[in-house]
């Protein structure tokens, strides 16, 4: 049996429709948050900090601000979509339809990438308005946006399937995503940290995502070539395999 | 002739160890209007969930028109339309969206989806409500939406899990008429209901389940022909006390 393209497109249509019901939550909130960061670091703090690698401080922090919001957008899109569909049981519409697990997962992830991309474009435009947006390598930039949003889309699916209540759904954001992204090199280089603390940055996956997109935007890259890309691809394989297994076992989906 | 639905030794044990279906075997010929009766918790909905993919069978075999419902689930599901007991719907979506999306999941092209959606919304008197969100609708209207959703892809086997629960007399009659029409067109219908009058009026074959097993199966005429009619047969089969059986000697 071939791919059910219309079914796949319908999953995307439905999720886009759901996303547009909450435009403030989906787009306005991250844009306002990013705008405040850009304003503080561009106009208030940035003027008092020396350049980093020949770039203004705002140019240095903008990729991190962008990545933080993309991570949040991706995670919240997939986790809330899956959890809500389980909570009110309309996930059963998908379960009784002739859709493969790959089509179900691909449909969810397509909307994740779409939401993360729209969020990212908005932040880039704000950066342009503050004279801080630049892209050195478009292919690398697109790689980082798509791969990182997919990683967190997959993580969101896992959490959405695992959660038994809204409290559990929000736990990863509070205890994992926000703290790790804050200490993942958004505001500083590894070289700015005391030597004994640098292992924290190297052990933090967010560091590689932020560093990667920063390399694609302004060319400042602190990791050996290919390391961040390799780790991200490895994460994609591991998380993708986990989500596939959960779907095929019906974990959180089937009775 | 290949049966529309064949269930052989179905068993379903939930993760916490609850046995919902002990051992159910059924064969429903194509074109049949089949009543599936039993008290609450007898295993009717779980059996339906196993047939449609909402639940995973622990053991046993289910075939839809000869297609294995577990191994070849995608082919099997194309043939089934389910109207569930509970409203498993995106409550913020409109009736038109709900019906159209379901057609999309089944791979129907836009033009055909529109044609069938228009027809079903018209048929179930949902046109005036098509742009309201599902949660704004009354219980009867909600029931019509999930029924229209089950029929959008014109399935060969229609499974209706208490479709008239909470529905007014008028809609119930509209629904009965429509079901009789599509059954006359060759569609196979499996109906669960607590309204025995409904089963007597619509079904030709009946199976009664209790505690996860089929305890009686036969034609409606056989079961309804004895003293006390179908209700008597049902109460006896499900182990009700004899003095609770109306019409019993």
Image (spheres, grey):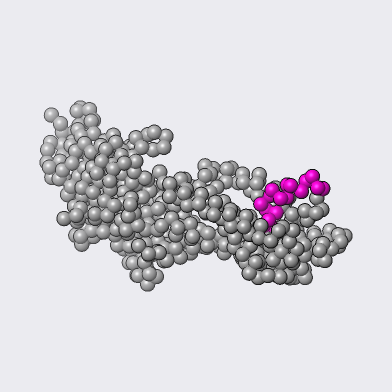
Q: How many marks?
A: 0
Name the residue nearer the viewer: B22 or B145. B22
Q: Residue at x 43, y 50 (%)?
A: A248
Location of residue A130 in the rendering, given as x and y in whole percent from the top left corner: 77, 68
User: Is A227 placed above or below A141 here?
Assistant: above
Q: Which residues are magenta?
A: A194-210
Decide whether the magenta segment is chiefly helix, strand or loop: helix
Name the residue nearer the viewer: B191 or A191. A191
Location of residue A179 in the rendering, given as x and y in whole percent from the top left corner: 70, 47
Name the residue nearer the viewer: A111 or B91. A111
Q: Residue at x 15, y 33 (%)?
A: B247
Q: Residue at x 65, y 64 (%)?
A: A120
Residue A201 colored in magenta in the image: yes
- Rendered-image quadrant of the N terminus of chain B: bottom left
Residue B154 appears in the rendering: yes
**Residue located farthest toward the bottom when viewing the structure as drawn:** B111
Determine whether, in the image, residue B7 is placed left or right of residue A65.
left
Determine whether, in the image, residue B80 is placed left or right of residue A181.
left
Quarter residue B208 falls in: top left
Q: Residue at x 48, y 60 (%)?
A: A107
Residue B37 colored in magenta in the image: no
- Rendered-image quadrant of the C terminus of chain B: top left
Residue B141 appears in the rendering: no
User: Is B154 placed above or below A76 here?
Assistant: below
Location of residue B168 in the rendering, given as x and y in whole percent from the top left corner: 32, 51
Location of residue A228 in the rendering, given as x and y in whole percent from the top left corner: 66, 57
């Amino acid at each position: 049996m071939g791919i059910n393209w219309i079914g796949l497109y319908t999953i995307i249509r439905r999720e886009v429709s759901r996303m547009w019901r909450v435009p403030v939550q989906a787009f306005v909130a991250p844009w306002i948050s990013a705008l405040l960061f850009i304003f503080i670091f561009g106009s208030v703090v940035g003027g008092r900090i020396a350049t980093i690698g020949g770039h203004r401080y705002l140019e240095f922090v903008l990729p991190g601000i962008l990545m933080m919001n993309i991570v949040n957008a991706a995670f919240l899109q997939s986790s809330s979509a899956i959890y809500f569909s389980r909570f009110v049981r309309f996930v059963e519409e998908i379960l009784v339809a002739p859709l493969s697990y790959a089509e179900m997962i691909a449909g969810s992830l397509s909307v994740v990438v779409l939401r993360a991309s729209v969020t990212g474009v908005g932040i880039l435009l704000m950066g342009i308005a503050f004279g801080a947006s630049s892209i050195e390598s478009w292919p690398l930039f697109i790689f980082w946006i798509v791969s990182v949003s997919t990683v967190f889309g997959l993580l969101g699916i896992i959490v959405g399937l695992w959660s038994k209540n809204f409290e559990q759904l929000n736990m990863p954001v509070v205890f994992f995503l926000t703290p790790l992204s804050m200490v993942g090199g958004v505001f500083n280089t590894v070289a700015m940290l005391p030597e004994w603390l640098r292992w924290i940055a190297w052990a933090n996956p967010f560091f590689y995502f932020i560093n990667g997109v920063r390399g694609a935007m302004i060319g400042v890259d602190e990791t050996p070539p290919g390391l961040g890309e390799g780790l991200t691809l490895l994460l994609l394989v591991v998380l993708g395999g986990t989500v596939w297994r959960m779907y095929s076992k019906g974990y959180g989906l089937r009775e | 002739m290949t049966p529309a639905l064949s269930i052989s030794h179905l068993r379903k044990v939930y993760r916490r160890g609850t046995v919902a279906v002990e051992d159910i075997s059924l064969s429903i010929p194509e074109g049949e209007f089949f009543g599936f009766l039993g008290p609450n918790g007898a295993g009717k909905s779980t059996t339906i969930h196993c047939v449609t993919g909402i639940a995973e069978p622990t053991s046993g075999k289910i075939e839809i028109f000869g297609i294995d419902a577990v191994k070849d689930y995608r082919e099997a599901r194309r043939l089934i339309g389910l109207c569930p007991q509970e409203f498993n719907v995106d409550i913020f979506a409109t009736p038109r969206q709900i019906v159209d999306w379901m057609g999309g999941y089944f791979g129907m092209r836009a033009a055909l989806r529109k044609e069938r959606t228009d027809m079903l919304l018209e048929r179930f008197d949902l046109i005036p409500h098509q742009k309201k969100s599902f949660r704004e609708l009354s219980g009867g209207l909600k029931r019509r939406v999930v029924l229209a959703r089950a029929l959008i892809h014109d399935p060969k086997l229609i499974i209706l899990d208490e479709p008239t629960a909470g529905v007014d007399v008028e809609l119930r009659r509209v629904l009965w008429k429509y079901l009789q029409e599509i059954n006359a067109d060759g569609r196979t219908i499996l109906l669960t209901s607590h309204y025995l009058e409904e089963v007597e009026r619509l079904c030709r074959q009946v199976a009664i389940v209790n505690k996860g097993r089929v305890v009686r199966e036969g034609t409606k005429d056989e079961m309804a022909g004895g003293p006390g009619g179908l209700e008597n047969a049902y109460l006896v089969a499900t182990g009700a006390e004899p003095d609770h059986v109306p019409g019993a000697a």
